[in-house]
């Protein structure tokens, strides 16, 4: 299921503005990779280039190479829609479809992508909700609207919706920043469980969270406002938090930043 | 700084503004209530079975009786046909403007012309169809010609309201759908349109209500008739606004009564359509909890 991502020499632009420059890294399968760094340093932008969501914004474009195992995601003729089916994404704010019930939300990815039998859908919905640790809380009200759940439940619903299409990689853009500590813990536990099956990349502003859930950590920074963001260093999380090789990383992690 | 009690000056200002707001509300409601009251009071005299099921055929100028069946039928057909033409085109245009056109030159040109169309006086729409359909193409007066004129009036309203509603759909939802690997067109059909449905329905109903009462364009395109013509594609038809206009211009009380009853029917039809549309939107809305 899980695949490795290899990025080399990647630049991303918003119109004429270069948002990130020359990023190269390897993201290992069946592990959690955390992106940390100050606001505006391009972590989210970089994350969005990994499943070709960056180019959804008018004027945005990408240069460089992203390989998913042996497939070039930006190769000629590659359909961005199929890339996004393979690499799922969970957003900062929970965004369940407001017109759909809990059941329909989870089934959305399957149903919107083609015909599928009722029994198969039932199975996938239960499996995904169990996978997202939400089944026990919602199994009696699958037909209620998804927007009626609490923030933390909504975010787990979005994760269930995402894993229902069986992607190889899960990208998470600050998935806990809008949640309370208990929901955050629930999601972190979930991430730890999911990494047996998926390659997971998570953007976070929470240092402790990066330390708790990730196996490897990448630190991004920008030289000055208006400059493109760059990858400063990337290493095993334990090494990054105890003995970083760059001064900037140490300053950021210990809070002596700027 | 200490906490103070509400000063008399602020209390007075609050009271003044409050009174002004209630007054403005009352002023706005007075004409509405008085129109409804008058139409119901005067319309009830002839709002009976005969009125709804009979036409004006063989009813002499001074005769009592007669009805508006031919006009009701005509209005329903004309407005129905106009909606069939302008609602799909209007919604598709709005989808293009919001989802594909963006700030491009073509999109801006369309927006400009839609705005211009919104300001067209209804007589001009009627004259346009008269000139194009009846004089240039040499086709006959018909309910369909009237429907064409009405759809010219409806389309800009539909485009504008649908565009505003589609713009209100948060980009989060589009992105969530793209991230699931759903193609753009499916995202629009299955996520964006259902989310905006209630608003679009309201906009369409406003457009329908507006054209249902139009008289001038019908005058020029469907002409007049006193008998039932169930085929909107050939020969003159009648419409309720035309019926009211015609009857109200006649110099005897039986006709004036019929005009009032016609106005009452018109209001009821618009209200009924509104109610049905709201029910549809309500059944489809997620807030109900299913």
Image (cartoon, coloured by chain):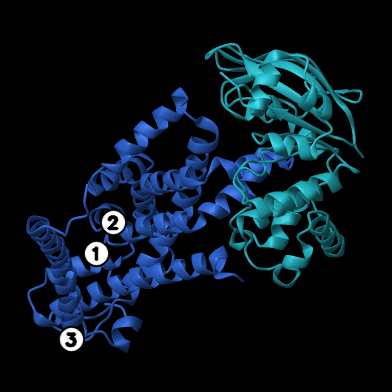
Chain ID at mark 3? B
Q: Are marks 3 and 1 in contact (CB under 8 Å)?
A: no
**Secondary structure category for the residue under label 1:** helix
Disc 3 target residue: B64
Residue B16 coordinates in the image, percent (x, y): 9, 60
The residue positioned 70% from the left and 39% from the top of the image is B179
Residue B269 coordinates in the image, percent (x, y): 35, 72
Query: What's the distance in space between the residues labelled 1 and 2, CA to CA?
Result: 7 Å
Q: Is residue B10 left or right of residue B228?
A: left
Q: Nearer the viewer, mark 2 or mark 3?
A: 2
Front residue of this view, candidates B285 and B233: B285
Front residue of this view, candidates B84 and A143: A143
Q: Is residue A133 left or right of residue B274?
A: right
Disc 2 target residue: B218
Q: Is residue B212 visible?
A: yes
Q: Is residue A30 left or right of residue A184?
A: right
- Disc ID at residue B242: 1
Residue A227 coordinates in the image, percent (x, y): 57, 11
Q: Are marks 1 and 2 in contact (CB under 8 Å)?
A: yes
Label 1 CA crowd tier, 10 Å (few <14, some 14–19, many 20+):
many
Query: What's the distance in space between the residues labelled 2 and 3, CA to CA?
Result: 26 Å
Front residue of this view, candidates B282 and B230: B282
């Amino acid at each position: 299921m899980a695949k490795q991502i290899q990025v080399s020499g990647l630049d991303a632009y918003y119109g004429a503005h270069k948002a990130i420059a020359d990023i190269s890294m390897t993201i290992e399968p069946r592990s959690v990779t955390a992106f940390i760094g100050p606001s505006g340093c391009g972590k989210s932008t970089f994350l969005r280039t990994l499943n070709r969501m960056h180019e959804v914004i008018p004027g945005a474009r990408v240069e460089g190479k992203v390989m998913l195992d042996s497939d070039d995601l930006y190769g000629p003729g590659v359909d961005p829609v199929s890339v996004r089916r393979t690499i799922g994404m969970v957003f900062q704010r929970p965004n369940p479809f407001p017109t759909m019930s809990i059941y329909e939300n989870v089934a959305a990815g399957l149903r919107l992508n083609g015909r599928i039998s009722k029994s198969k859908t039932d199975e996938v919905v239960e499996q995904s909700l169990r996978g997202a640790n939400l089944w026990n809380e919602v199994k009696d009200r699958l037909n209620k609207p998804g927007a009626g759940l609490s923030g933390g439940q909504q975010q787990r619903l979005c994760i269930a919706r995402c894993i229902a299409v069986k992607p190889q990689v899960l990208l998470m853009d600050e998935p806990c920043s809008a949640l309370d500590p208990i929901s955050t813990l629930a999601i972190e536990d979930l991430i730890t469980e999911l990494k047996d099956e998926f390659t997971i990349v998570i953007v976070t502003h929470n240092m402790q969270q990066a330390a708790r859930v990730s196996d490897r950590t990448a630190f991004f920074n920008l030289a000055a406002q208006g400059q493109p963001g760059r990858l400063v260093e990337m290493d095993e999380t334990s090494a990054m938090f105890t003995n970083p090789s760059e001064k900037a990383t140490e300053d950021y992690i210990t809070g002596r930043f700027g | 700084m200490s906490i103070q009690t509400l000063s008399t000056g602020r209390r007075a200002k609050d009271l003044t503004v409050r009174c002004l707001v209630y007054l403005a509300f009352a002023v706005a409601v007075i004409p509405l209530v008085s129109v409804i009251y008058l139409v119901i009071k005067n319309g009830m005299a002839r709002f009976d079975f005969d009125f709804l099921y009979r036409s004006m055929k063989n009813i002499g100028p001074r005769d009592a009786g007669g009805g508006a069946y031919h006009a009701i039928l005509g209005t329903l057909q004309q407005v129905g046909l106009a909606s069939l033409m302008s609602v799909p085109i209007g919604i598709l245009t709005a989808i293009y403007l919001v989802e594909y056109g963006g700030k491009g030159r073509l999109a801006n040109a369309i927006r400009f012309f839609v705005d211009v169309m919104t300001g067209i006086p209804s007589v001009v729409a009627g004259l346009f169809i008269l000139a194009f359909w009846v004089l240039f193409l040499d086709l006959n007066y018909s309910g369909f010609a009237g429907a064409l004129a009405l759809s010219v009036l409806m389309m800009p309203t539909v485009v504008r309201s649908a565009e505003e509603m589609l713009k209100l759909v948060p980009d989060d939802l589009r992105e969530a759908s793209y991230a699931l690997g759903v193609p753009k067109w499916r995202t629009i059909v299955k996520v964006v349109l259902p989310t905006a449905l209630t608003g679009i329905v309201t906009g369409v109903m406003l457009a329908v209500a507006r054209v249902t009462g139009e008289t001038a364009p019908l005058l020029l395109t469907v002409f007049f008739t006193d008998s039932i013509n169930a085929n909107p594609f050939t020969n003159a038809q009648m419409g309720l606004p035309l019926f009211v206009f015609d009857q109200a211009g006649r110099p005897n009380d039986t006709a004036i009564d019929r005009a009032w009853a016609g106005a009452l029917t018109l209001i009821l039809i618009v209200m009924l359509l509104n109610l049905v549309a709201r029910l549809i939107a309500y059944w489809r809305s997620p807030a109900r909890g299913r």
